[in-house]
Each structure stands twice: as structure tokens, then as C-alpha cells.
Image (cartoon, rainbow, N blue to C red):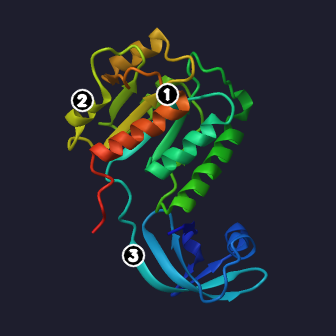
Amino acid sequence: MQTFFIDKEAVKGEALFLTGETAHHITAVLRIQIGETLRFSDGESFYYRGTVAEITKKAVKVTVTEVVPIDDEPQTAVILIQCLPRGEKMEQILQKTTELGVKGIIPVESEHSQVRLKEKKKEKQRRWQKIAAAAAEQCGRGIIPQVESACSLREAVAALPDGTALIFCYEKEENSSIRQTLMALKGKRQSVALIIGPEGGFSEAEASLLRAENAHSVSLGKRILRTETAGPAVLAVLMYEFGEWEVLD
């Protein structure tokens, strides 16, 4: 079911009062009518299921019929460290990884990235956050993945929570496969970072930096995946191997 994200301030007792973009989207774009049932999330703790009770030009009132904890997010917190690709590829990556359950995305200006945001970092971060929010709403997520402002690879790794396992997808790796690494990590970690390079790959200095951080260098097989393919592909494999695609009770 599609999920609409709301601020906690919208909850008033046993009713939700929706204004602004959310109300406009529900009434003008989706043309939801009085009596229809919708699901909302505060993006943090609870889902609210309710029936549209009143529609005015300024607001939508929803009568809450059920409040339940958000319990369908992945147990494994996966952070995608994505080196900046060209064109609109970053938007594709954000959409697909959000659908697949990523918890956060850290864009990186790597040595071989052909994109330099300079003074546009904050502007891009705001746009990318909106894209992640729209994807989360469309696919029924309970939370919106946090998209950080673009930074260096060293800064991205330093920002990770302590104990995060680093999976370094490296085109020059010849021994360790993604499956071998995931099987070894299975059941041991609750936080994993997937590190994906740009079109030009990682520099030797960047590879050395990640090895020094005890990153697990992995091969993705005999074919070279595009940067916009690699992140979603590895995330899908991880979610499967870690049991995140099992049928809910």
C-alpha cells in the first residue's frame, strides 16, 4: 500500500489534519474522495491507517482507525556510499535503492568522478532527498532514507556508525566474491555499507584507503556492471542473503 509521510504535528488525538503539498497531492493529483482509506507514516515510529472524513480547500481531515508500529523495515541497516555518476544516473540509483530498502545514501566525489558539484552540493542534496521521499512513499516504506550532502570517500567512511561492515565492490578484485563475503557476514552485522565507484572506477589511493579501513573487497563477477546497476544489484543480493525478503507473518 502506498504510504503518505506526515509530520507528528499533524496527529491531533484520533484524527490527522493534512495541509500543504500532502493535502494537494491527495486531493488534486490522486483525487482521493471522502470515505477512502489511506495509510500514513510519521517516518520514525508509527503507521496510521485512517478514513478521509473531510476535504476543504486548505486541509484534509482523516479519522484514524488504527495505529501500529513500523515493523517492516529491514533489520540490517544498509548505507550506500555511491561515487557520483554522470547525468541523471544518481536519481535512478536513489529510486531503486530506496525501493530495495536502503537506510541512507552518502554521495561521494571520488578521484575519478566526472561530476563536481562545488557550490551546488546543498541544492543537489535537497533534490535527491525529495526523490528518495517520493520513492519511499510510492513503494510503501515506513521511513525515508537519509541522503547526505556529497563529500570525499574518506569523509563518508568516517561518518559511518562504529562497527559497520564495509563492502568494497572493486573491479580489480580477483579472489573474493560478493556471495562469499555476505555469507561470512550473515548474522554478524546489523550495519553494512556498500561502496560503489564511478564510471572510471576507484583510484589506487582510494583502494588503499578502503583496505586500511578493513573493507571487504569483492568482485561482482565476470561482467563489469554500470555504476547505476551495481548498487541496486548488490543491495538486492544482500537483502536476499540476509533474509530480508521473507514473507511477513
In the figure, 7 relative to 178: above or below?
A: below
Q: Give the image quarter of residue 171.
A: top left
Residue, disc 3: 68
Q: Is residue 154 visible?
A: yes
Task: Classify residue 180 as left or right of residue 28.
Answer: left
Task: Classify residue 49 as left or right of residue 23.
Answer: left
Q: Which quarter of the rendering shows the C terminus?
A: bottom left
Q: Earlier in the sequence, mark 1 or mark 2?
A: 1
In the figure, 124 relative to 30: above or below?
A: above
Residue, disc 2: 180
* Element under disc 1: helix
Residue drawn at point x = 70 percent, y = 69 percent: 25
Residue drawn at point x = 34 percent, y = 46 percent: 239
User: How many C-alpha atoms fall within 10 Å of the one at disc 3: few (<14), some, or many (≥20)?
Assistant: few
Please name whichever residue, 208 or 247, is drawn nearer the observer in this view of the structure. Answer: 247
Q: Give the image quarter of residue 210.
A: top left
Q: Position of residue 31 (x, y in %)?
A: 71, 77
Q: Which label sits in the foreground, 2 or 3?
A: 2
Residue drawn at point x = 32 percent, y = 46 percent: 240
Q: Position of residue 155 (x, y in %)?
A: 49, 28
Q: Which label sits in the foreground, 1 or 2?
A: 2
Residue, disc 1: 155
User: How many C-alpha atoms fall within 10 Å of the one at disc 2: few (<14), some, or many (≥20)?
Assistant: few
Q: Earlier in the sequence, mark 2 or mark 3?
A: 3
Proximity of marks 2 and 3: CB atoms separated by less than 8 Å:
no
Amino acid on which the number 2 mark rests in the picture: Gln
Q: Give the image quarter of residue 16.
A: bottom right
Proximity of marks 1 and 2: CB atoms separated by less than 8 Å:
no
Amino acid on which the number 1 mark rests in the picture: Glu
